[in-house]
């Protein structure tokens, strides 16, 4: 179970990094428009959700 939590944390961090870099590139360099902004924002939100759930699950295992 610990391996699953570690991979979820890594996936969450990857989503947050991709979302943040995509938003920055879209804003300052590429100007891809609204669909790209919404996609990168969704990646950020999904990454934060995955990270939050992984940390909550990990906290339960540590207490048990």
Image (cartoon, rainbow, N blue to C red):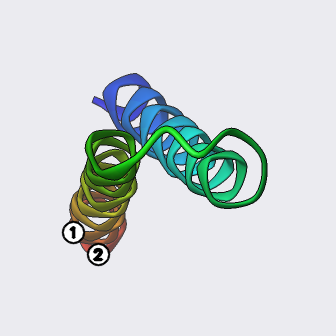
SS state under label 2: helix
Q: Residue 14: x percent and y percent? A: 56, 36
Name the quadrant containing residue 3. Answer: top left
For the residues labelled 1 and 2, say whether their Cβ atoms are less than 8 Å apart.
yes
Q: Nearer the viewer, residue 34 or 46?
A: 34
Would you call the spot at circle 1 few (<14 residues within 10 Å), some (14-19), or many (20 or more)? few
Residue behind mark 2: 63
Q: Quadrant of the C terminus?
A: bottom left
57 over 46 or under it: above or below = below
Q: Is residue 22 left or right of residue 42?
A: right
Q: Which mark is residue 60?
A: 1
Q: Residue 30: x percent and y percent? A: 68, 39
Q: Nearer the viewer, residue 16 or 3?
A: 16
Q: Is residue 60 left or right of residue 41?
A: left
Q: Nearer the viewer, residue 21 or 60?
A: 21
Q: Is residue 64 left or right of residue 31?
A: left
The residue under the point 34% across, 57% down is 41
């Amino acid at each position: 179970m610990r391996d699953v939590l570690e991979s979820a944390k890594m996936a969450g961090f990857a989503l947050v990094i991709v979302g943040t870099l995509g938003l920055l590139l879209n804003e300052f360099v590429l100007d891809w428009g609204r669909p790209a902004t919404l996609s990168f924002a969704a990646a950020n939100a999904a990454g934060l959700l995955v990270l939050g759930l992984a940390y909550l699950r990990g906290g339960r295992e540590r207490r048990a």
